[in-house]
């Protein structure tokens, strides 16, 4: 059978145009930041939720859009999975946390959290566009968009339709991940969206007795990949059981995300 299988070379065509859609007059976004990963299961949504919460706690006006319609985990990460978005006279409103963080997710519009979304691609992408154009976000310093994993049609639509100021890549440090991250970075570059930097999740474990950081997957190949792609590691995150929900962070994780938030603000404000 293998004798009849031939590899076909596919030359990707760079896409350099943007045809941005306009949000409604009630909205104004100072900066829009997307969080992306080459594959699922690397903690992208966890980083998105923690970064959004940290920016809000530091005094910024922040909204987070859960653009992963198939696997929407932002409400659960923020502990608002039982909340619902409300329709008012001026339009559909995000769920607003006590500290002011605004959240939009398809799971906040469904009667059951585990109800599957059986939609084809065009309906999904149109819904994401409506999250940007029709929701009453108001005045925001930062809108964070939690993209679905991989280089999907949704991610491409967002980068072409919404004026994203920068992308944060999230990855785990295994050697094979470099190829996957390369595809995601290449997609952003082809669409002329700047990559702010990379968050390395599950980077190390910390000894409970001496606090030494133990790097499990450290390798020269990974470092060479980062240099080749001109990727800056913004933050290394440890493997921790209490990392799964935003409101259960310990002091170490809180400080780490404050560091990330400060770096992101500096980078997007100076571009």
Image (tube, rainbow, N blue to C red):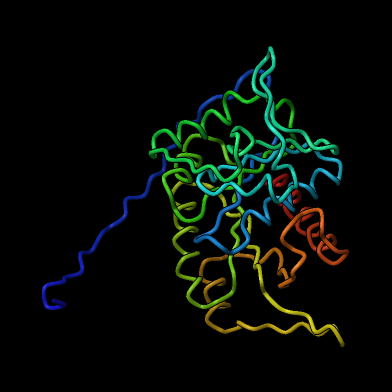
Residue plotted at (56% across, 42% down): 67
Residue plotted at (54% across, 58% down): 37
Residue 166 position, x and y percent, is: 61, 48
Residue 237 position, x and y percent, is: 72, 68
Pick the front one: 219 or 154: 154
Quarter of the figure with the N terminus: bottom left
Q: Quadrant of residue 219?
A: bottom right
Residue farthest along the top direction in this orientation: 89
Pick the front one: 120 or 67: 120
Q: Relative to 170, say whether 116 is above or below.
A: above
Residue farthest along the bottom direction in this orientation: 210
Left or right of residue 111: residue 264: right
Q: Relative to 24, say whether 214 is above or below.
A: below
Left or right of residue 271: residue 223: left
Q: Quadrant of residue 220?
A: bottom right
Residue plotted at (64% across, 65% down): 232
In this rendering, the count of numbered labels is 0
Q: Relative to 185, say whether 82 is above or below.
A: above
Residue plotted at (56% across, 36% down): 163
Residue 235 position, x and y percent, is: 71, 65
Pick the front one: 121 or 51: 121
Q: Quadrant of residue 172?
A: bottom right
Residue 95 position, x and y percent, is: 72, 33
Residue farthest along the left direction in this orientation: 4
Left or right of residue 56: residue 176: left
């Amino acid at each position: 059978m293998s004798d009849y299988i031939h590899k076909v070379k596919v030359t990707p065509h760079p896409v350099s145009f943007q045809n941005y859609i306009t949000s409604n007059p009630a909205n104004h976004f100072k900066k829009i930041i997307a969080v992306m990963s080459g594959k699922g299961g690397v903690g992208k949504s966890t980083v998105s939720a923690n970064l959004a919460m940290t920016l809000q706690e530091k005094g910024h006006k922040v909204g987070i859009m859960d653009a992963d319609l198939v696997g929407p985990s932002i409400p659960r990460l923020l502990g608002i999975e039982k909340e619902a978005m409300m329709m008012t006279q001026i339009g559909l409103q995000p769920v607003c946390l006590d500290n002011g963080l605004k959240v939009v997710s398809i799971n906040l519009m469904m009667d059951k959290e585990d109800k599957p979304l059986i939609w084809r691609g065009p309906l999904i992408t149109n819904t994401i566009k409506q999250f940007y154009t029709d929701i009453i976000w108001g005045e925001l310093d930062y809108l964070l968009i939690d993209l679905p994993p991989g280089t999907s049609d949704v991610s491409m639509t967002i980068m072409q339709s919404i004026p994203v100021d920068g992308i944060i890549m999230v990855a785990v440090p295994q050697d094979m991940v470099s190829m996957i991250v390369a595809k995601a970075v290449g997609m952003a570059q082809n669409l002329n969206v700047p990559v702010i930097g990379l968050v390395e999740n599950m980077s190390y474990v910390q000894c409970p007795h001496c606090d030494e950081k133990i790097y499990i997957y450290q390798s020269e190949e990974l470092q060479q990949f980062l240099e080749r792609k001109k990727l800056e590691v913004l933050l290394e995150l440890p493997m921790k059981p209490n990392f799964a929900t935003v409101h259960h962070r310990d002091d170490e994780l809180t400080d780490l995300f404050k560091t990330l938030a400060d770096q992101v603000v500096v980078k997007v404000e100076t571009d």
